[in-house]
Image (cartoon, rainbow, N blue to C red):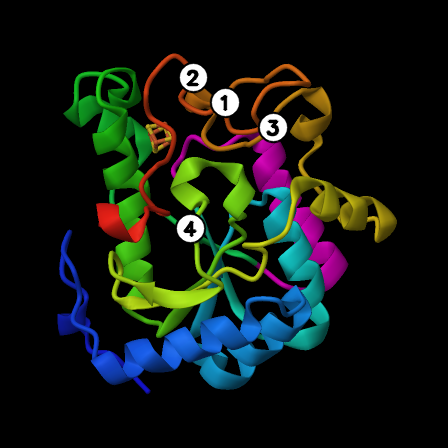
Amino acid sequence: MGFTDDSKLEGGVADVSPALLADLAHANSTLESAEPQEILRWAADRYGSTLTMATAFGPEGCLIIHWLATIAPKTHLFNLDTGYQFKETLELRDRIAARYGMVVALEQPETSVEEYESMHGGPLYRIDSNRCCHDRKISVVRRVLTRFDAWMSGIRRDQSPDRSSAAIIGWDYRFGVVKISPLANWTKAKVWNLITQENIPYNPLHDQGYGSIGCFPCTRAVGSGDDERSGRWSGSAKTECGLHVRDEER
Ligand code: SF4
C-alpha cells in the first residue's frame, strides 16, 4: 500500500478510502486487547520499511524500543529535535543506541533556534507556544511522514482527555497516514514496572520530579500527586503540542 504526497494536505484532512477505514477498524478491534508486542509484530509485518515511530524518549517510547529491538530492529525511529530539548534527553538517545543498536534519527525544523528567535524578536514560546509547536514540531512531523505509510507513538489513553479515545490502530486524519498506539490501553504503573524489571534506559529527569518531559522552556517538575502531564506548558490552557489530537478536533 502507499499514499501519495498529495494525500497529506497541509493543515487539513487527507483523503482516505472507506475500504481502508474498514480494514483499519477491523484490525483495531482485533488488536484492542492484544499485548503491545503482538501489535508491534502486526505493524512491522504489515508496514515494514514504511513504518516509523516518533519518540520524545519518554518511558513509553523507551519501552517500545526495547521490544522493537527484538521484534523489528530495523524499524525507523525519529525524534523531534526542536533545539529546546534537555541535554538529558539527548544523552538518552545515545544510551538507547548503545544498549539496543537502534539509532533514533533527529529531525530538525528548517531554522535553528538562533535563526528562529531572531526572526521573531526573541523566544516565541513565551508569547505564542501554539505557533512555536507548529513550526518546530508539527511541520517537522508532517515532513517526515511523507516518507511513511504508518507511524507509531507511545501515547496512553489515561494520560489526558485528549488521548482518552486513542485507537490502537486508526487513520490519522491530521497527517494522512495510519497511526498505531501499542500502549494505548496500558497504565503508567505497568510501563514503569517493566522499565524497572528490564532495566530499560529512561530519562533521569523523571527521578527529579519531571512527569512528562518535552522542551525545557515548557516543562517543569511536578509534585508526586500531580497529574503526570501537568508540568507541560503549566500556567497556560495548553495541554498538547498538537501531534495527538482527538478525531473530532482534527
Ligand atoms: S514545547 Fe515549547 S519550546 Fe517546544 S516547540 Fe512547543 S512551544 Fe516551542
Residue at 17% in and 17% down: 121
Q: Looking at the picture, how far across and down is residue 172, in whole percent?
A: 31, 62
In this figure, which residue is indicated by the disc labeled 1?
230
> Sequence-wise, which precedes: disc 1 or disc 4?
4
Magenta region includes residue 187: no
Residues at marks 2 and 4 touching, judged by CB atoms closer than 8 Å = no
* Residue 120 visible in the snapshot: yes
Q: Quadrant of ligand 1?
A: top left
Q: Secondary structure at mark 4?
A: loop
Residue marked by disc 2: 234
In the image, 152: left or right of 131? right
Q: Nearer the viewer, mark 1 or mark 4?
A: 4
Amino acid at pointer 4? Ser
Do tag 2 and tag 1 residues touch (Cβ < 8 Å)? yes
Q: Are marks 3 and 4 in contact (CB under 8 Å)?
A: no
* Earlier residue among tags 2 and 4: 4
**Magenta-highlighted residues:** 81-103
Q: Amino acid at mark 3?
A: Gly
Q: CA distance from mark 1 to mark 3?
A: 8 Å
233 or 91: nearer the eye?
233
Whole-percent x and y of residue 151?
42, 65
* Residue position marked by numbered label 3 in the rendering: 211
Q: Residues under labels 2 and 1: Cα distance?
A: 6 Å
| Separation (CA) of disc 2 from disc 4 | 23 Å
Q: Nearer the viewer, residue 36 or 128?
A: 36
What's the distance in space between the residues labelled 3 and 2, CA to CA? 12 Å
- The residues tagged by marks 1 and 4 sit, at their Cα atoms, a distance apart of 19 Å
**Residue 235 against residue 162 in the figure, above or below:** above
The mark nearer the N terminus, 1 or 3, is 3
In the rendered image, which residue does mark 4 sit on? 165
